[in-house]
Amino acid sequence: MAAETTAQGGRSPAEQKELVARYAVDDLFERGLLLPGMKLGLGTGSTAMPAVRRVAELLAEGKLPGLRGVPTSFQTSIACEELGIPTFSMNSREIGGALDLAIDGADEVSPQGHLIKGGGAALLLEKIVAYNASRFVIVADSSKEAASLGTGFALPVEVIPEARVSVMKALEKLGAQAVLREGVRKAGPVVTDNGNLILDCRWKALEGGRSPIDPASLEGEINRIVGVVENGFFTKNPPRVYLARADGSVETRDFGN
């Protein structure tokens, strides 16, 4: 894993998100990793949105002609419409089920480069995009760093509504405490863009705060439960991670991607 840090002055938390997103897009462009004509996956959430806006600015400046975007949620699709980014589905002929690059945020990043994603309930399409991209990039602020996964930020598991109870029981057998995610300013549970429900799962930390689970193996084990659509562990496509620090610096980590 390679790492480098670039300082750019102190920033507030909101400014850190804007800083890291714009810095990452500009760095990718300058390194020749974001090019005209690319098939680009565009993420969801409060850190991914500034990255989407910066991509739109480069497109408007004529620096990314022919760019083809694949959004990961309704939120991102609407943003792309408003910003003038041409969008396609993964199934479009122009995309052919594969992407050159995907840029997204994360809810937690471990020292191994493993992720938890899905705080915005968009994990299914986010994973389809991330796992079918030749290069996967994460933008995040320092609060997203975690010594281990599974005991802090809840792991989201997207399930078919009819399988809610049976999947919860199966997750409990894996040691998780699973709860149905409830809507905010909406009565009842969160319903995903795909019409499914979200179970949020946590494991009890071991002595010293260590996690009792291995995300890489548990990712597949959870997906084998009947009724599970997808879960928020991202371990199969090691990302390039851009992390904003409280002092306003940006650290870049490469986990083999």
Image (spheres, grey):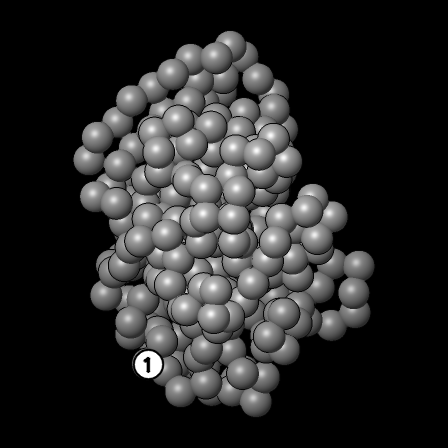
Q: Is residue 252 left or right of residue 216?
A: right
Let me know if residue 199 appears in the view: no
- Given residues 4 and 119, the one toward you in this image is 4
Q: Horizontally, is 65 left or right of 111 in the view? A: right
Furthest-top residue in view?
Answer: 9
In the rendered image, residue 189, in percent from the top left (x then y), is placed at 68, 71
Question: What residue type is disc 1 on?
Answer: Arg
Q: Residue at x 42, y 23 (%)?
A: 250
- 151 relative position to 11: left or right: left
The spot of residue 135 in percent (x, y) is 33, 48
Label 1: which secondary element: loop
Q: Name the foreground residue: 146 vs 233.
A: 233
Q: Give residue 120's quadrant in the image.
A: bottom right
Residue 95 is situated, as x and y percent measured from the top left of the image, at 45, 64
With respect to residue 56, does 6 lie above or below?
A: above
Q: Residues within 10 Å of mark 1 (few under 14, many from 20)?
A: few
Quadrant of the rendered image containing residue 56 = top right
Residue identifier under label 1 = 224
